[in-house]
Amino acid sequence: MKCQQCCASKSPLARRLQLKKQKEAEEAEAKARPKQIVVTPQSLLYNYDDVSAMAEYILRTCRIRPKFGVVCSTVLSSMVNMIENPVDIPFRDIPQFPVSPVDGHDNKLVVGTLMGATVIAMQGRIHAYEGFELASCTVPVHVMKLCGVKYVFFTSAAGAVNPGYAVGDIMLIKDHINLFGMMGSSPLIGRHDSRFGGPCVSMVNAYDNYLLERGMEIGKSLGYQECLRTGVFACLGSPSYETEAEQKILSLLGVDAVGMSLVHEVIVAHHCGLRVFSFVLITVSGFGEDEDPAVVNPESFLRQQQYACNELIARLIYDIQNDL
Ligand SMILES: O=P(O)(O)O[C@H]1O[C@H](CO)[C@@H](O)[C@H]1O
Ligand SMILES: Nc1nc2[nH]cnc2c(=O)[nH]1
């Protein structure tokens, strides 16, 4: 306005020059301003209040404060049948809780008691390969934390990389290789909320040594020593299984078993102070497929190994609950 007034008395050429100068000055000022960086808000997708609202909804619905959390693999969803006095809470009923669009995923929480302990189990999990951000895959872990969970058990189906492994083996995870993180993707990226943990987290003892040892002892005492392993796990982001070349690379990296979930969930759980116990059931053999017992009698063999996994979870919960 001011400019139009002062320019009104000038010639058309002088006015154009004046406007050009003004535009140049504005452009120079914009260039000098610090660039506005839009952060990738992984850690901010669900803020503390959002997570609190989810936890409150669950606690109000089930009227139980769970001490143990279990994330059930797609192949281990029968685990929830062990839960007594179960209260089912569909994911879609929980405000803002992610829901898997994949057919056959159960998409519900089951809350109740197991071996006298209060538990909350996820029947079906959220996978990155379904198109979700890692923050969406892991928000259930923060929800468990705010529900009062102290111990969390993660389970998954996995492919064997270690040539000594066979279908049906149960690998207790002692460590992981965070391939997502190495590529710059993590649910912890973005501003942190100190109520969940600090900006960085040491991953020493992420797979709680005590729980790992107890899990191994229990597995042996139940008679599963032949199929029990401890090893290193890696998670890939693609729903395609590994090529032979990828198997070789993973093997060179020291990976024993590979899946499509779990690693980012463990990172978030350890970051917010939960004690973690994890294992995978080998469902795909990397080598020597012809010799797999699963190929000979797939259905009943898998059922037998699912039973073994359920027993392991139940016994470990019992022992922790009773300080054994
Ligand atoms: O992560 P869970 O639920 O064990 O599922 C595993 O099994 C599926 C592949 O068979 C993949 O979804 C993989 O991640
Ligand atoms: N990446 C991967 N995920 C799995 N989930 C179950 N089996 C496999 C497998 O062989 N590879």
Image (cartoon, rainbow, N blue to C red):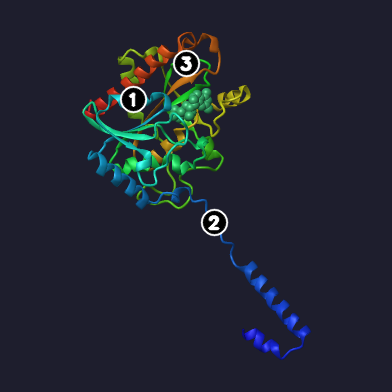
CA gap, disc 3 to disc 1? 19 Å
User: Can you give x and y, in whole percent of width and height, for residue 78 in the image?
Assistant: 35, 23
Which residue lies at the image location 67% right of the left edge and 89% below the top edge? Answer: 6
Q: Nearer the viewer, mark 3 or mark 1?
A: 1
Instruction: Classify mark 3: helix, strand or loop.
Output: loop
- Give amino acid for label 2: Val
User: Can you give x and y, in whole percent of width and height, for residue 121 in the image?
Assistant: 33, 32
Circle 1 crowding by C-alpha within 10 Å: few under 14, some 14–19, many from 20: many
Q: Which quadrant holds the N terminus? A: bottom right
The first of marks 3 and 2 along the sequence is 2
Residue receiving disc 2? 38
Q: Which quadrant holds the C terminus? A: top left
Farthest residue in the right direction? 13
Residue 48 shows which numbered tag? none
Residue receiving disc 1? 79
Whether residue 198 appears in this view of the structure is yes
CA gap, disc 1 to disc 2? 42 Å
- Give amino acid for label 3: Val
- Give amino acid for label 1: Met
Which residue lies at the image location 45% right of the left edge and 9% below the top edge? Answer: 297
- The image shows residue 232, relative to residue 269, as above or below, that is above
Residue receiving disc 3? 167
Instruction: Classify mark 1: helix, strand or loop.
Output: helix
Q: Nearer the viewer, mark 1 or mark 2?
A: 1
User: Can you give x and y, in whole percent of width and height, for residue 165 in the image?
Assistant: 48, 16
Tell me if the residue at label 1 has its CB under 8 Å from ligand 1.
no
